[in-house]
Amino acid sequence: MAYAIKVEIKDPQAETFVFAAQKTMYGGKHIVEGDVAFLFASENEGGQGLVARGVVTSSEPVPRRADLERQTPRVSVCVHRTALATRRLGRGELKRLKDWKDGRPETELNFKFYRQATNKIVGLSDAAAAFLDEFF
């Protein structure tokens, strides 16, 4: 399966990325070793959007806290970079796509990443993963 991770990325050229205790939504909690991950440098933290594709080399769910009633599942992952993006794709390119039911992969990305703009790991449809592959 393919996932997208939007998070602060200080060095998009790095070979390996480690993301600790990341929020998950839209099936992101199911990410496991061997999955494809598309990495987005969060614009909320000065990034430019899609920067890399990689393979998950480790994944570990973060235990829930007993003192909290409602919690978003979190997971820590390590990703080995396999390619750098060759074209730009970020909030600026996706924000015009707001017809949530149009079935377009670009709209799926806009909905999952920017409707609630927090950093997160999200599961992707096959169509969205194929769309993202065009940027490499």
Image: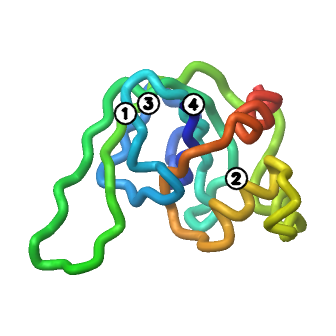
Question: Of the residues tagged 1 and 2, which is closer to the observer?
Answer: 1
Depth check: give the residue in front, 88 or 95: 95
Q: In 3D space, how far apart are the residues under numbered discs 2 and 3 (Cα atoms)?
A: 19 Å
Residue at the location (63% across, 33% down)? 52
User: Which residue was labeled with disc 3?
Assistant: 79
Q: Which residue is mark 1?
A: 78
Query: Where on the picture, by quarter, is residue 77?
Result: top left
Dot 2: element: loop
Q: Quadrant of the N terminus?
A: top right
> Viewer-proximal residue, 107 or 52?
107
What separation in Å lies between label 3 and label 4 (alpha carbons)? 13 Å
The answer to whether marks 1 and 3 mark residues whose Cβ atoms lie closer than 8 Å is yes
Identify which residue is drawn at 32% across, 29% down: 58
Q: Which residue is mark 2?
A: 48
Regarding mark 1 in the picture, which secondary structure is present there?
strand
Select label 1 or label 4 by which is in front: 1
Q: Label 4 amino acid?
A: Gln
Callout 3: SS: strand
Q: Which residue is mark 4?
A: 13
